[in-house]
Amino acid sequence: MQNIAIITDTDSSLPVDVADRHNIYQVPMTIHFGRQSYEAVYAINDADTFRLIDQEGKLPTTAAPSPGKFISAYEKAFEAGAEQIICLCVSSEMSATYNAAINAKESLASREIHVIDSRSLSMGLGYMALAAAEAAEQGATSGEIISLIESMRLRTHLFAALSTLKYLAMGGRVSNISATMATMLNIKPILTIRNGKLDLLEKVRTQKKAWERLIELSALKTGNKQIEKMCILHVDAQAMAEQFKSEIVSRMHCPQDILFVEVTPGLSVHSGAGMVGTVFVIK
């Protein structure tokens, strides 16, 4: 049995304690506020990020990890006894992270490193990394783990509702006029993953109706199949996430163990504070 290490990036939204439990290393995104830089998850969380955003009145910029950071992660894994590495990255449609991981792999051409474009993000990616680590712990080969990841990609779904368009307007992704109108009309955009991107699916008026629609969409995707894993995503909105969990559990057959997951700053700066949603994997 070969020792296979699992590496991902912090756009996986994997809670640190869960990642640590399975020896998954997350290469951090970088968050830049002017001249000050922070490593996502390890040096700054969503709450601190939005406190600084509201204080400074502008969004930070984000940067994918450099190839050097991936080289360091690979070398640490090999030094710890790994014989192979499987590295899962946030969708290449969203970030340069995958390319950085590939470039790092080429610098260690003599070692067996598999770099996978998840075509997903947040816990869509996180659940793939977690499943890969669990399979590695049980003695699966790299080929078996990669097949499992490819299967999970088709069975993993994300639906989320924005609380406000304020932060999209700050980032120039919508106009201030559109954001103001959306606020006046109490419009809550619903997002999903399509073609490897976080994409606008629908616009719904009021938070209550938006959450109802999230649950309807989740139920439609699930059909008669069992949900294998599920989490509630949020951006600096723990109380809202707990309320949403109560609602989805009351209306769907959900697994008993449901994680609460912070989106993390590499992604959350693009959605804004108050976003709530769910990621689930169907059996």
Image (spheres, helix red, strand yellow):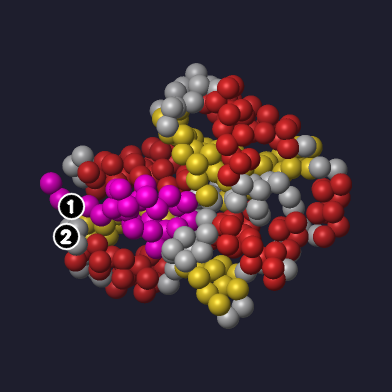
* Depicted 181 relative to depicted 43: above or below: above
Question: Residue furthest toward the top?
Answer: 224
Disc 1 target residue: 3
Instruction: Left or right? Give the position of 173 relative to 229.
Output: right
Q: Are marks 2 and 1 in contact (CB under 8 Å)?
A: yes
Mark 2, other Cα within 10 Å: few <14 / some 14–19 / many ≥20:
few
At 16% from the left and 60% from the top, the residue drawn is: 81
How many numbered callouts? Answer: 2
Residue 250 lies in magenta, yes or no?
A: no
Instruction: Left or right? Give the position of 271 relative to 93.
Output: right
Query: Range of the magenta residues?
Result: 1-27
Q: Residue 205, image x and y in percent?
A: 79, 37
> Which image quarter: residue 117?
bottom left
At 69% from the left and 68% from the top, the residue drawn is: 55
Say what amino acid the circle numbered 1 marks: Asn
Disc 2 target residue: 81
Q: CA distance from mark 2 to mark 1?
A: 7 Å
At 45% from the left and 58% from the top, the residue drawn is: 10
Q: Residue 105, image x and y in percent?
A: 31, 66
Label 1 element class: loop
Q: Residue 66, image x and y in percent?
A: 43, 72
At 49% from the left and 38% from the top, the residue drawn is: 231
> Which image quarter: residue 89?
bottom left
Comparing 92 with 30, the one in front is 30
Say what amino acid the circle numbered 2 marks: Gly
